[in-house]
Amino acid sequence: MIELKHVNKYYRNDEEELHVLKDINMSVEAGEMIAVMGPSGSGKSTLINTLGFIDTKFDGEYLFEGENLVTSSDDRLSKVRNQIVGFVFQNFSLIENNTVYENVELPLLYNGYGFHETKERVMDALVKVGIADKADKHPKQLSGGQQQRVAIARALINQPSFIIADEPTGALDTHTSTEIMELFRELNRKESATIFLVTHDPEVVPYCDRLISIRDGAIIEDRAVIHE
C-alpha cells in the first residue's frame, strides 16, 4: 500500500543544513499495525508527517498504492489527506464547544456530506469505539480515555486507508492506556485498519505486528513483533 524509496529530508537555514530523514526505505502492506519508536528528536515526527501527506518537501519517492500523490496540487493533496489518512493526537484535539457527535461529524462535512447524510456514519463510528451513549456530551464532560475514543471515532469516520496515532496514550493513565491499545488492536483485527502508532512507550509494542525504530533520522530496526 505504501512505499518510501530513498526518502531524505533536509532543513536548511543560513548557517547550516540539518539532515533529518536519512535514506528511508519502507514498505507497508494494508492491515499492518506498526509501532514507530524513537527518542525525541529522532525524526519520527518528520517521518509521520511525510507518511500523512503533511510534509511533502523531501527528496526520494513516496508511492501510495503505486501512485505518487505528493506531486498533486495543494487542493488535491488536502482532499487526499482528508480521505486517506485518519489522525489521532496525544492531546485529543477536540473542539470544546462541539458535542461528541459534532466533533466526529466534522470531517464528513469537510468532505462535502450534507447534515442529513451523516447520522448513520457518525453513530456507527461511535458504536465501534464504545461511546454511542456519549453523543450529546461535550469533551469536558468526558474522561481522558473517553475523549481519546472520540478522537479515534473522528479518525475513522472517512474510512481512511490508514490511521496515524501520535503518542495516543501519552496523556492517559496505565489502565486507560491499556483500554485504548485494546481498542486499536480490535480495530486492526476486526476492521483490518492499517495503523501507525508513534510512541516512545515500549509497552505499546506488543500490541503491534511490527516495530520500526528510528534514531538520528535513520531506520535502525524494522522487524516483526513476536507474540508469546
Image (spheres, helix red, strand yellow):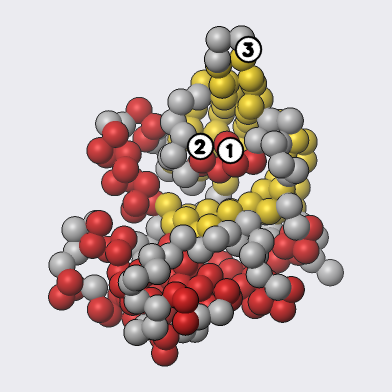
Counting residues from the start of the chain, the first of labels 1 and 3 encountered is: 3
Question: Residue 191: horizontal and vertical position, in percent?
Answer: 49, 70
Residue plotted at (23% across, 62% down): 109
**Residue identifier under label 2:** 50
User: From this viewpoint, is residue 95 visible?
Assistant: yes
Q: Residues within 10 Å of mark 1 (few under 14, many from 20)?
A: many
**Residue 27, percent across and down?**
59, 41
Is 185 or 104 nearer to us in this picture? 104
| Vertical order, 69 against 186 (above or below) | above
Q: Nearer the viewer, mark 2 or mark 3?
A: 3
Give the x, y percent position of residue 51: 51, 41
Residue ID at (51%, 59%): 88
Disc 2 on helix, strand or loop? helix
Disc marking residue 47? 1
Q: Can you tell which mark lies on residue 16? A: 3
**The disc labelled 1 sits on which kind of residue?**
Leu
Q: Secondary structure at mark 3?
A: loop
Separation of marks 2 and 3 at Cα, in angstroms = 22 Å
Check the image and name the residue furthest to the right.
228
The amino acid on which the numbered mark 2 sits, given as a three-letter code, is: Thr
Q: Quadrant of the C terminus?
A: bottom right
Q: Residue at x 47, y 56 (%)?
A: 87
The dot on residue 5 is none
Q: Position of residue 71 (x, y in %)?
A: 35, 28
Q: Is residue 203 above or below residue 12?
A: below
Q: Estimate how packed mark 2 is, as few (under 14), some (14 to 19) or many (20 or more) residues with alpha carbons within 10 Å.
A: some
Q: Residue at x 39, y 83 (%)?
A: 137
Report which quarter residue 205 is drawn in.
Answer: bottom right
Distance in Å between CA atoms under marks 1 and 3 = 21 Å
Tell me, yes or no, whether the two marked residues, 1 and 2, touch with CB atoms within 8 Å: yes
Q: Residues within 10 Å of mark 3 (few under 14, many from 20)?
A: few
Disc 3 residue type? Glu
